[in-house]
Amino acid sequence: MSDCIFCKLISGEIPSTKIYEDDHVFVFMDIMPLTKGHILVIPKEHKESVYDLSEEQAANLFRVVPKLAKALKKTFHPAGMNLLNNNGAPAGQSVFHFHLHLIPRYDETDGFKATWRTKEKEYPLEKIQALATELSENI
Ligand code: 5GP
Ligand code: ZN
């Protein structure tokens, strides 16, 4: 896509710190890393979000994730690792070319915070069961 910044990184029109590529994926350092070693894994073909990926494209993308995670672990010795993918502006997506974040974690004050809000009262077990039934019918 001509106005997509990540497509421009893939084509080389805009420089990036590429660390890996194959026929299907392109992997590079995030320009505003949340932690040391924060990288992004993207499909070479422009796809906006998870809804647009075929099963094959998703498999091609995720296939490289373990070796990238292991390389990050070997290189930077993080204590943990978050995989993150934002879809849609309300979920925090700011670049509309699918990307999976690999965020090495060092400690709880390393700059990344995934907050988790639970609303236990809104979701009694019966309601969760009803949601599961409804959802599984749509797979
Ligand atoms: P999102 O918020 O869409 O999940 O994440 C977009 C990510 O892309 C951000 O972490 C941001 O720092 C990164 N980013 C945005 N523009 C560029 C760029 O031009 N080059 C690189 N390497 N990363 C970028
Ligand atoms: Zn793109």
Image (cartoon, rainbow, N blue to C red):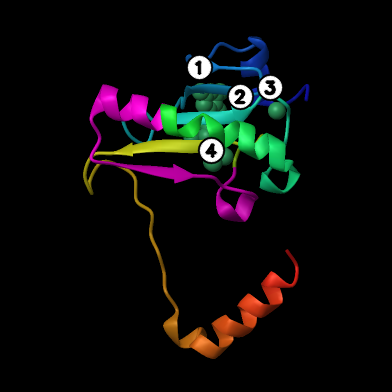
Q: Position of residue 53 (x, y in %)?
A: 72, 41
Left/right placement of residue 26 relative to residue 35 reads: right
Q: Secondary structure at mark 4?
A: strand
The residue indicated by pointer 2 is 25
The residue indicated by pointer 4 is 100
Left/right placement of residue 77 relative to residue 20 reads: left
| Residue drawn at 23 percent across, 40 percent down | 79
Q: CA distance from mark 1 to mark 4?
A: 14 Å
Q: At label 2, which amino acid type do we have?
A: Val
Q: CA distance from mark 4 to mark 2?
A: 11 Å
Q: Secondary structure at mark 1?
A: strand
Instruction: Indicate which disc, 2 or 1, sits on the residue closer to the N terminus.
Output: 1
Q: Is label 3 in contact with label 2 (beta carbons under 8 Å)?
A: no
The residue indicated by pointer 1 is 20
Q: At label 1, which amino acid type do we have?
A: Tyr
Count of numbered badges drawn on the protein: 4
Q: Is residue 89 above or below residue 15?
A: below
Between 94 and 135, the one lying in front of the other is 135
Q: At label 3, which amino acid type do we have?
A: Cys
Between 126 and 2, the one lying in front of the other is 126
Q: Is label 2 in contact with label 1 (beta carbons under 8 Å)?
A: yes
Instruction: Indicate which disc, 4 or 3, sits on the residue closer to the N terminus.
Output: 3
Q: Secondary structure at mark 2?
A: strand
Q: CA distance from mark 3 to mark 2?
A: 12 Å
Q: Is mark 3 within 8 Å of ligand 2?
A: yes
Q: Position of residue 20 (x, y in %)?
A: 50, 17
The residue indicated by pointer 3 is 7
Q: Secondary structure at mark 3?
A: helix
| Residue 80 visible | yes
Instruction: Indicate which disc, 3 or 2, sits on the residue closer to the N terminus.
Output: 3
